Image (spheres, rainbow, N blue to C red):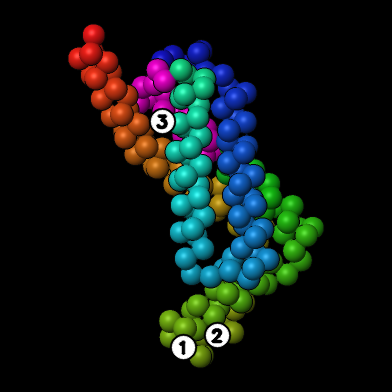
Amino acid sequence: MTLFTFRWTRLIAAGLVSGLILVTIGVAMYLMGVYFARGSLLFVNLVLAACIVIGTRWYAKHVLEDRTTYGSALLVGVVIAACTGVVYVTYNIVSILFVYPRFLEDMVQAEFARRQALGMDASQATQTLEALRRETTVWIIAAGNLKGIVKFGTIFSALTAIAFRKKRIKAAAVAHVRS
């Protein structure tokens, strides 16, 4: 499938919906007090993976009329991941700067507690806390989240495109046998 047959508006819309789902999950996790908990990143990645699979499936069925290739499925997944990342990073910037004034300090304290639990030397506590505060900025968080979402989304899209293509090959073989 060539690039000019893509309906970019619908593809970007799928990515924006995915981003809004991740934002909703992020807000809920923060309000429940589990945003910084161990395993929260895994949960967010699972939601992102589900969004990519569902979005790719929806786009392939409703826009590409089930005529997909590995490349088209990969491109759909990557665009969904990139759009999701942009929406989520926008949420990060707005929420940290205007909505959750203690977010950065909460993040620093969560990481500091994690390091203490791992056996950080007490003599390093002050320096570690100061370094964490210097290194934890809205821009570093936003850049890290964008990079992480796009990287994970691209890798997952590559895997999804393989599995998705295998389904299409099997369906084509069954159709050929029946005719």
Quarter of the rendering occupied by the C terminus: top left
- Asked if residue 21 shows in the view, the reply is yes
Q: Which residues are magenta?
A: 66-82
Q: Position of residue 61 (x, y in %)?
A: 47, 24
- Mark on residue 74? 3
Is 72 part of what is drawn in magenta? yes
Q: Is residue 178 left or right of residue 23?
A: left
Question: Callout 1: helix, strand or loop?
Answer: loop
Name the residue: 47% across, 45% down: 50
Distance from disc 2 to disc 3, alpha carbons, whole Å, reads 45 Å
Q: Nearer the viewer, residue 38 or 98?
A: 38
Name the residue: 35% across, 26% down: 70
Residue located beneath label 2 in the image = 125
Mark 3 is surrounded, within 10 Å at the Cα level, by few (under 14), some (14 to 19) or many (20 or more) other residues, namely many
Distance from disc 1 to disc 2, alpha carbons, whole Å, reads 7 Å
Q: Position of residue 159 (x, y in %)?
A: 34, 39
Question: Callout 2: helix, strand or loop?
Answer: helix
Q: Nearer the viewer, residue 19 or 97?
A: 19
